[in-house]
Every structure is written in structure tokens, then in C-alpha cells.
Image: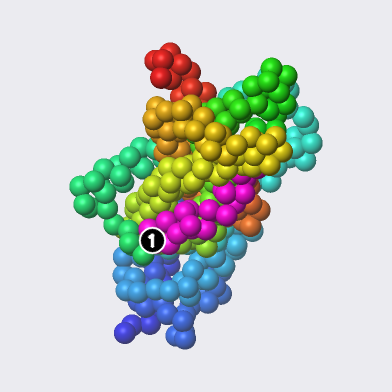
């Protein structure tokens, strides 16, 4: 193994050519910068230094240390340096080692943007976010199509864990909130119906409201704050730890391996949770009607059965299915967009909850208006 070698040669045009050869390894003797200083001496003065590495066998950080010292000497002497003849890896390491963060002008940073400038920047940010959303949805659709064709790659164990997290462990909070919502609907409705002596119709009110819309909406909001935020925090933490970059390096699609099982789990569990929420809401209304207004339980349940039709049930379940897709997409999208800091993880979780709830409200309005137009 030959030692590190350097050959200096002056070329026309006041250029110093530096040929690097041999093996540059830590622990071996490498040339010092004193020889380079001597090569710069003489007349005419050197105005440019060119590096070549045709005879370079192998190298490590020792050559990088030498080149950085040489660049410092040339910078002091106001001599330009050309590194095109070096290996690509050496050039990249030099650029990385000499990169300087851009320093913002203090006066510029303190100055406030004009109103039109803020509108323009917000519009640009909105377009960029919309593009990222469309791209992410497209990747999710591709991953789902690969699942349908049996080519998707993710761990079945992960899917089972997410099913448990999105289903069984969410039952207590869904039960509590839905029961209280049904109770509140019954209290508010029966106070008005009591004016007309039609207290029994509170069963119709609570039943239709819970089964057709409120059960799905409340379950969706609960899951957005509970599971959607958890998805964003999980994926955001993986972004901070560069685990997603590692997946991409290994040729594993992050959307297919990480996002797809989460989407499947929440989408499959949401209709079941909505069905359970409907039942708890009806029981909450029954508690008010039977316990506070002495309405017979059998009569209450019969009125509920007569009022609630299959159309109402299917609309509520369909809304739950849609909300499951929206909440999982919102959480995973914000998690994949997360930055590289701890605060970015918190911002991603917050943004996931806000995005999920807004998507639920918009989807609810669209579905209700569509059902009204279609007469169902």
C-alpha cells in the first residue's frame, strides 16, 4: 500500500496544479501544509489552485483535513481553489464542512410584512399544502391498490395492534361521551316537547339524532383528538429519529408500511364504534325520559324503533366509515410532514386534530346536504 503523495506543478496562467495520489489513511504519515506553502512561493504569484486525484487509491478523513487547511491558506492569500478534479465524495464532504448558514439581516427580520405580502405568502403556503395533500392521498390510494392485489408490505402484527388501539381501547371514552350527548339531547328536547305535552317524542328526537348524525360526529371528533393525534405523534417521532429516512434507504415505502395499517385499522373500527355510540346515546336519552319524566321504558324503546329506520342507520355508519378515512389520513399526513425537532412533533399532533375535525365538519355538511337532495 503506497503512502500519500503530492506533486506540485505550475502551469501557464499563474495556476498551481496539485496532484494527489497514493493512500490517505488515518494513522499513516500524510504530507503537511508546509510543502504547499513553499509551492505557493515564487514569481509570478499564484492566482488559482487546481486539485487532481487521478492517482488517488483510497482515502478517509485525513485527506479532508489536509484540503480544508489548504483552503484556509488560499482564502487568506485570496487565491481561488478548484476542486473539480477531486472525487465526488470528497467534494461533497468539503461542501458540507464549509457550508455556512444564511444569516438573516436583523433589520429585515424585525420589519413587519405588509398585508398584501402576508396574503401572498399564505396563498403560496396554501397551494403548497394542497399539493402535498393531493400527493399524499395519491400515495395512499396506490398503497391500497397494492393491498387489493396482495402486494402490500406491512406487518400483520402492526395491524392487530392498531385495531386494538383504535377499537377496544377507545370504547370507554366513546361510551362516556355518547351517553352524555344522548342525555343532553334528551334534556334539551324534552323541555320544549313538554310545552305541547309530547314528551314521549323525545325518543324519536334522540334516536334519529344519534343514529343519523350525532353518534358518528362525536365518535369522529373523539377519534381525531385521541387516535389521529397519536398517529401524528408516532410518525413525527419517527421523522425526528430519521427512521422514515431509513425505511426509504432500505427500499421500503413508508406510506405502505406505516400509513396503510393505521388507515385500515381506524377505517374498520369506526363503523363499529359509531354503532356502539348510537346505543349509548339512546340509553342516555332513556335515562332522562324514564328517570326524570316517568316515561315507560318499553314505550320509549318502541318509539325509538319506529322512528329510526335502516336509512338512518346506514347513513350514520357510512359517515363513520368516511370519518375513519379522514381522521387517519389527517393524522398520518401531519406526522409525515413533521419537522426534526421535539416542538415539531407537538405541532404535528395539534395540526392533526384541527385538520381532522375540520374535515369531519365539512364531510358532515356534504353528506347531510346530499342526503337531503336525494330524499333519504
Q: Main secondary structure of the magenta part?
A: helix
Which residue in the structure is indicated by mark 1? 160
Q: Nearer the viewer, residue 20 or 127?
A: 127
- Residue at point 39%, 47% (across, down): 268
Asked whether residue 242 is in view, the answer is yes
Q: Residues within 10 Å of mark 1 (few under 14, many from 20)?
A: some
Question: What residue sits 39% from the left and 30% below the top?
Answer: 310
SS for dot 1: helix
Residue at 41% in and 45% down: 267
Q: Is residue 373 left or right of residue 141?
A: right
Residue 135 % position (x, y): 40, 37
Residue in the foreground of this view, choosing between 71 and 367: 367
Q: Quadrant of the C terminus?
A: top left
- Residue 296 is a magenta residue: no
> Relative to 155, is 110 above or below?
above
Depth order, front residue of 180/165: 180
Q: Quadrant of residue 77?
A: bottom right
207 sits to left or right of 17: right
- Report x, y in % for residue 330: 50, 41
Residue 344 visible to an observer of this rendering: no
Check residue 177 for magenta coloring: yes
Task: Give the color scheme: rainbow, by chain, secondary structure or one colour.
Answer: rainbow
Residue drawn where x is 45% and y is 59% of the image: 164
Q: Quadrant of residue 248?
A: bottom left
Decide: is 367 above or below 160. above
Where does the image place residue 233, in percent across and percent down from the top left? 56, 54
Magenta stretch: give its range: 158-183
**Which residue is outermost to the left?**
149
Image quadrant containing the N terminus: bottom left
Q: Closer to the camera, 40 or 117?
A: 117
Amino acid at each position: 500500500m503506497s503512502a500519500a503523495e503530492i506533486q506540485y506543478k505550475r502551469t501557464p496562467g499563474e495556476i498551481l496544479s496539485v496532484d494527489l495520489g497514493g493512500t490517505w489513511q488515518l494513522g499513516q504519515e500524510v504530507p503537511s501544509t508546509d510543502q504547499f506553502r513553499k509551492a505557493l512561493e515564487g514569481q509570478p504569484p499564484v492566482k488559482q489552485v487546481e486539485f487532481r486525484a487521478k492517482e488517488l487509491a483510497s482515502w478517509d478523513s485525513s485527506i479532508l483535513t489536509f484540503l480544508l487547511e489548504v483552503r484556509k491558506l488560499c482564502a487568506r492569500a485570496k487565491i481561488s481553489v478548484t476542486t473539480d478534479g477531486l472525487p465526488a465524495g470528497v467534494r461533497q464532504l468539503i461542501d458540507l464542512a464549509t457550508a455556512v448558514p444564511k444569516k438573516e439581516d436583523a433589520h429585515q427580520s424585525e420589519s413587519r410584512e405588509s398585508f398584501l405580502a402576508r396574503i401572498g405568502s399564505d396563498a403560496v403556503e396554501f397551494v403548497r399544502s394542497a399539493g402535498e395533500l393531493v400527493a399524499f392521498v395519491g400515495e395512499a390510494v396506490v398503497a391500497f391498490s397494492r393491498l387489493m392485489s396482495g402486494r402490500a408490505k406491512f406487518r400483520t402484527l402492526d395491524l392487530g395492534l392498531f385495531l386494538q388501539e383504535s377499537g377496544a381501547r377507545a370504547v370507554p371514552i366513546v361510551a362516556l361521551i355518547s351517553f352524555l350527548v344522548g342525555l343532553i339531547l334528551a334534556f334539551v328536547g324534552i323541555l320544549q316537547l313538554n310545552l305541547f305535552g309530547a314528551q314521549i317524542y323525545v325518543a324519536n328526537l334522540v334516536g334519529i339524532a344519534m343514529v343519523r348524525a350525532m353518534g358518528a360526529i362525536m365518535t369522529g371528533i373523539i377519534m381525531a383528538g385521541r387516535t389521529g393525534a397519536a398517529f401524528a405523534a408516532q410518525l413525527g417521532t419517527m421523522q425526528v429519529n430519521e427512521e422514515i429516512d431509513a425505511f426509504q434507504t432500505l427500499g421500503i415505502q413508508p406510506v405502505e408500511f406505516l400509513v396503510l395499517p393505521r388507515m385500515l385499522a381506524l377505517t374498520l373500527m369506526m363503523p363499529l364504534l359509531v354503532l356502539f355510540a348510537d346505543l349509548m346515546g339512546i340509553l342516555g336519552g332513556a335515562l332522562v325520559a324514564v328517570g326524570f319524566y316517568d316515561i315507560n321504558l318499553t314505550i320509549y324503546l318502541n318509539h325509538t324503533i319506529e322512528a329510526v329506520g335502516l336509512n338512518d342507520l346506514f347513513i350514520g355508519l357510512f359517515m363513520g366509515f368516511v370519518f375513519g378515512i379522514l381522521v387517519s389520513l389527517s393524522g398520518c399526513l401531519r406526522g409525515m410532514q413533521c419537522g426534526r425537532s421535539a416542538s415539531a412533533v407537538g405541532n404535528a399532533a395539534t395540526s392533526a386534530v384541527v385538520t381532522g375535525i375540520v374535515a369531519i365538519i365539512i364531510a358532515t355538511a356534504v353528506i347531510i346536504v346530499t342526503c337531503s337532495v336525494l330524499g333519504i
